[in-house]
Amino acid sequence: MMLTVDPRWNDALTRLPDYLGSHVRVSLTALALGLVVSFPLALMVKRRPLARDIVLGIASIVQTVPGLALLALFYPLLLALAGLSLNWFGVGFSAFGFLPSVLALALYSMLPVLRNTITGLQGIDPAIIEAAEGVGMTPRQSLTMVELPLALPVIMAGVRTAAVWVIGTATLSTPIGQTSLGNYIFAGLQTQNWVFVLFGCAAAAALALAVDQLLALIENGVKRNSRMRIAVGCIGLAALVAATLMPSLARARTSYIVGAKTFTEQYVLSSLIAQRLQAVGLSATPREGLGSAVIFEALAANDIDVYVDYSGTLWVNQFKREVEPRAKLLDDLKATLRDRYGITQLGDLGFENAYALVMPRKRAEALGIHTITDLVTHAASMSIAGDYEFFSRPEWAALKSAYGLSFRQQRQMQPDFMYAAAASGDVDVIAGYTSDGLIAKYDLVVLSDPKSAIPPYDAIVLLSPKRADDKKLRDALQPLLGRIDIAAMREANLRAAGGDNASSPDAVARWLWERISKR
Amino acid sequence: MTDAFPSIAYANVGKSFERSRIKAIDDVSLKVMSGEFLAVVGGSGSGKSTLLRLANRLIEPDSGTVRVHGEDIRHRDPIELRRSIGYVFQSGGLFPHMTVADNIGITPRLLGTPAAEISARVDELLDLVQLERSHRDRFPHELSGGQRQRVGVARALAAKPKIVLMDEPFGALDPLTRDALGEDYRALHRSLGLTTVMITHDMAEALLLADKIAVMRAGHLVAQGTAKDLANSGDAYVGELLNTPRRQAERLQDLLPKDGA
């Protein structure tokens, strides 16, 4: 009862057709591709021990690569291929979302199918195969009438394992731009929306079970020679695909795609942008939970239309340039984006979301620490926590070299948990974000950076090359520029991290719009 | 005239395995006359199974020729050749996922015989091998060893072959079943006018069922002929093989009247 009245529940339900549909499409396509490649491969190598060992070896190695890493690897690989294809044949393709996900997942599905097909065929009594030959079967007849039917239970077990793996792993395709049930999980984790996380897990599990049972029904039908069962199983799978295709076909093709990275503020801002577009009658589709590098390349490749990035992130991390004074950096960045990528920097939103070293206020006061310089003498006995990318970012290297900082221990954490960890004393210092509302909530203080080692991080709105001259889009977003100050953004972020009814990114974005449009 | 014609004729046939290291068959010449029941006797590794498989091209010879009904089988399509020759496998060799009826009807089905015809033929064959028709829809694992072998015989006869090859067909059966099945098959062999080649390691079985016996040892054909011919053979190994059934027969002769009395 509690759940049904929670608006997050309704929010999750309204997203289901889109997320589930995309999930079914990407995982079943990957599974089909995996089967189409694995079966003939298994039949080809079954009587060649060397080739068989090589194929199984490669498939096993692929399997040991974590799913997320495999998906992440396919993105740059396809990006490079797309570039080559564009150069050589004049035809490019999108390296974003569907294609890399399908290829990575198909690869992932191959081991169980290959291994079970080979094992199943090898496990057949040689006397039976000789009998097939002896009664006058051709090799093909022996395969289809005797060997495959006998190996079927083992083969189908492999197919079902592959299906469950692929459906589970497909939740990880969200960061490379493929909408999936993983969107619930990534978004929920970032915005502390546990209803979403649970919903995503449950939906993925239910889908995996359903597909597994339909495959079991088909297997049973083949074994018992029951056309009925086979038909019901096939119709079930087909219905699943058809049902999930409908919403995406019905969706308008001219929809603007609004990107968001993997943290709370980005979810709120992408909702805000989508709401502004919808307010002027444009349709908008969010594409959330994208990695920093993925989202920029996707914008440059016109795979998404608009998103919010931060000047310092692009300048230092993406372009590997030296830190410059704030205004000059913004101008140079704008020129670089336009000249090298055709990307339009529409303007800044009015706040900065910089990395900053943050610690509990009381402790800082007790130790007399106000700036990073003050921190240096204490650092050797302190631990520091940062998000998953901070310690490999150039800002961290710059901080260390500018101040000669050296901590006792370094830890990586889910960003939303860092602040609580600092407040509770689990870590002494965190590399937080200046716009994070949790700084005020946990009574933390931002240490100033007198040597300007950390670049400015103005939030800027970027438009894809193909939307450069889109007046409607520009006009719709104009009211946001320069209007969101750090206090408004911090409060919005705090609300979004609240974990209560009003904390969905959509609700917070509406609140934020009300607040900034009143002035 | 036709009786004088050999159904199967091996001429100087040789076959090696594992890159010529093992000579399974060495320069064997042998004729199986039409209507004859030939038993090939030998220990394991004697080459008797290879000899059988050469007749329907499950194995190709390295040297020499094999003729079936006068024709060099190198010039025959191996698939078509196998479909024209019945083959009974050791312990049945039935397809475990097919019913009795499907197993029996497999070769006619491969030959494209209409389903109704196959069905009628299956009933006919079940009668012939003395299995109840109610066994049609059973699976091999639901049958006894003897019943499975009867199905194996029915399957071999399904496409009305003139030649039947049998690979130790009754070896795994209990003595009573084995005797009954042997006698039943011998009757079929005669009534259907078949030419049969049966592999066995059991000389007693060979003597009781076959018209002629060929003895294989280490890839060589050491003797061939009727039981009498073998008894007159000077070969020590043949003598040894004959000794066992002879001794058994004598002991039984001594023992049984007492029992019966």
Image (cartoon, grey):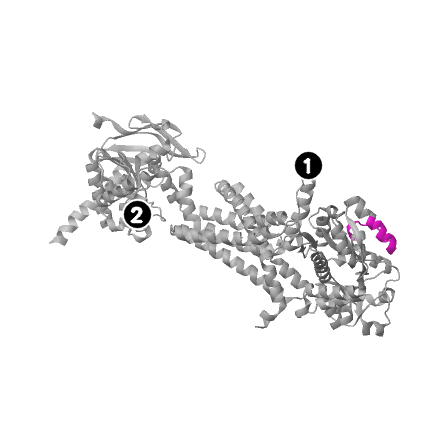
Q: Do badges 1 and 2 share one subunit?
A: no
Distance Cα–Cα, label 1 vs label 2: 62 Å
SS label for mark 2: helix
The secondary structure type at the circle numbered 1 is loop
Task: Judge whether A441 appears above or below A146 on screen.
Answer: below
Horizontally, is A56 left or right of B126 in the view?
right
Tell me if residue A67 comes above or below residue B250 in the rendering.
below
Chain part drawn in magenta: A317-334
Disc 2 packing (10 Å; few <14; some 14–19; many ≥20): many
**Which labelled disc corresponds to residue B100?**
2
Residue B56 drawn at (x, y percent): 34, 34
Is B68 on the left or on the right of A397, as rendered?
Answer: left
x, y (%) of residue A61? 59, 49
Q: Is residue A381 visible?
A: no
Residue pointed to by mark 1? A90
Residue B28: quadrant of the picture = top left
Q: Position of residue B143 (x, y in %)?
A: 29, 52
For the residue marked with disc 2, what is the amino acid? Answer: Val
Q: Is residue A233 magenta?
A: no
In percent of width and height, residue A129 lies at 39, 42
Q: Quadrant of the N terminus of chain B?
A: top left
